[in-house]
Image (cartoon, helix red, strand yellow):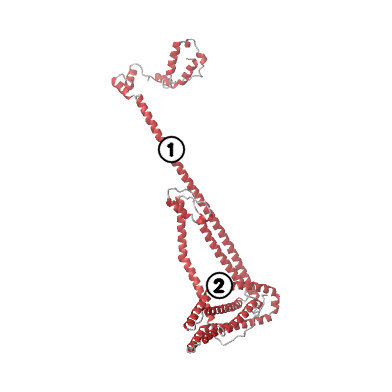
Amino acid sequence: MSAKQLCDALAAAGFDGDGPLDPDSLEWAFLQGDDSRRMLAWISARLRPGNVISAADLELYEQLEMEGKLLEGDDLDFAFDSISAFSDNGENQEYTFLSEESLEDIRDSKLALRAEVSDLEKQLASLEWKLDLLTAQATTITQGKKSRSSAKTRANGQLTGLDEKFAKRNLEMNAVLGKLAATTQELSYYHSEADIGVYLSYCDFLSYVRSNLGCTKELNRWFSKKFEKGPLQLVVKDNKSSGDFVNSHHFVVQLNQINSIFAKSKMRYIEAQVEYAKEEAILSTLRTQLASQQSYVRQDSHSLRRKSSELAEELKDLSLDVQKCLSETVTGLCADLAQLAGANILEGGHNVKLLRQECYISHQKKFINYLVNQLAAHRFLKISCQLEKRAKISNAYLMLKAIELELHSYLSAVDVRLDRYHSIDQAASEMFEEGSVDDRDSFLHAVRDILSSPSSSQAMAPAYVSSYGLVEQISELQDELQYLQHEAENVLPRERGRCTDELCRMVQTLEQILGVPLSDEQPKLTPWVHGSHP
């Protein structure tokens, strides 16, 4: 054994001094012998930290010796024998022998511990797999929350934009109302004098006068040709050609029935002529006012022409709206008239062809259309005069323009509200949560396909959602269904009732207009006037 090996063994045993051991200082001559080498090797093999006294143990030994507590002699033997492991008695020796473990028991316990370690490793791998699964689910839930938050943010942005549009429209409406108030105040100040009357320009109503004259001429020509020389003469000729002179009295009865059917149309024509005479009187009054205010007309001629053209366009739109509103009523009246005419003609047994009946009904519809147009023009002139008389303004154009602006603003507000409903519906349909669904769960896959069907038209890839996302989408669809049911049960009946009431009022007004008492006054028919708008 070399000195270096001895130093390493002493250092491993816990030898400590002032400094590390020097192997060169231990190279003595007696250490080179075989016996000394075997002895030092044996000592080094048994030098362990457990059976070597440390410096702390030496200090404790010296302290016990100074205090007189160190056991020596018989006391040490008694204390040594009191320990069962070091006792010389046979019982203690047998107990110590039985308590010692054999090498085979140690090997068995080692194998058992290895099996337990393998089981623990398997459990650890299973727990790690479950942890990965939970991490994936947590990631899916986090992605779903992010998608929902982004959808909510997008919907909130759209709602904010709509609120800004509403605020802008409110500001515009307030500005229009301010302009109306300022115009009313200015006009009231302008017409504050008592000797100033109502000023209406004849050129403002020139287009209506022309259309009125044309309508009157058309009604006169149609009535004279169709009512006196048209269908009635055809029916008489058919009866004469058949050679049935026996049923002449019955033929007269049928003619009286036909005359009673169309007497109402003739009465309407006469009433329209009476209304036309009244409007002619109003126009003559306007011409008188125009003659008395030539200077005022010269100053505002350019503006009046421009307003006349604009008013013509507006009245064209209004006439289209009136035709659209009255189409159902007039169609119903024509259908009733056709039914009555068909019943009376076919029951007479005069072998009138169906084509002639349809032609007659079409002419009657044309007459009703002309009559409605003329009455609408007359009613508009009357309403314009009443507005000017009450508001004391120079013409009705400004008032109608303000009313049109208000109607357009409210229509735009309704359009914005509808756009908002569509955007909310679209945002609700686009809110989906990305994730994965178990491929073995066919029910969730079917629900996912049903919920994702609205977005299939956008050529998007199929989105896989989690069960939580499906529940959220189903709850949102249920809320939307409840809202639509509430709208259908509460809002739509009110709107339908309101529209029905308005239509009833329109029909009653039309009946009142058409139900004026018959008068013998016959207006003077003026010829057709051809010309364009100024």
Question: Closest to the observer: 447 or 290?
Answer: 447
Residue 418 sits above or below residue 444 on the image: below
Where is residue 310 shown, x and y percent of the image?
64, 71
Q: Can residue 319 be seen from the camera position used here? A: yes
Confirm or deny contact between disc 1 and disc 2 (CB under 8 A): no
- Residue under the image location 70 percent in, 75 percent down: 299
Q: Which residue is identified by label 2? A: 324
Which mark, by number, is residue 14? none
Q: Is residue 217 left or right of residue 487?
A: right
Residue 372 sits above or below residue 132 on the image: below
| Mark 2, secondary structure of its residue | helix
For disc 2, the neighbor class at 10 Å (few under 14, some 14 to 19, many from 20) is few
Q: Which residue lies furthest to the left in this view?
A: 91
- Residue under the image location 52 percent in, 57 percent down: 426
Q: What residue type is labelled 1?
A: Ala
Question: Closest to the observer: 406 or 446?
Answer: 446
Where is residue 374 shown, x and y percent of the image?
59, 79
> How many dots with numbers?
2
Q: Which residue is identified by label 1? A: 125
Question: Closest to the observer: 250 or 324?
Answer: 250
Q: What residue type is labelled 2?
A: Lys
Where is residue 403 shown, x and y percent of the image?
59, 71
| Mark 1, secondary structure of its residue | helix
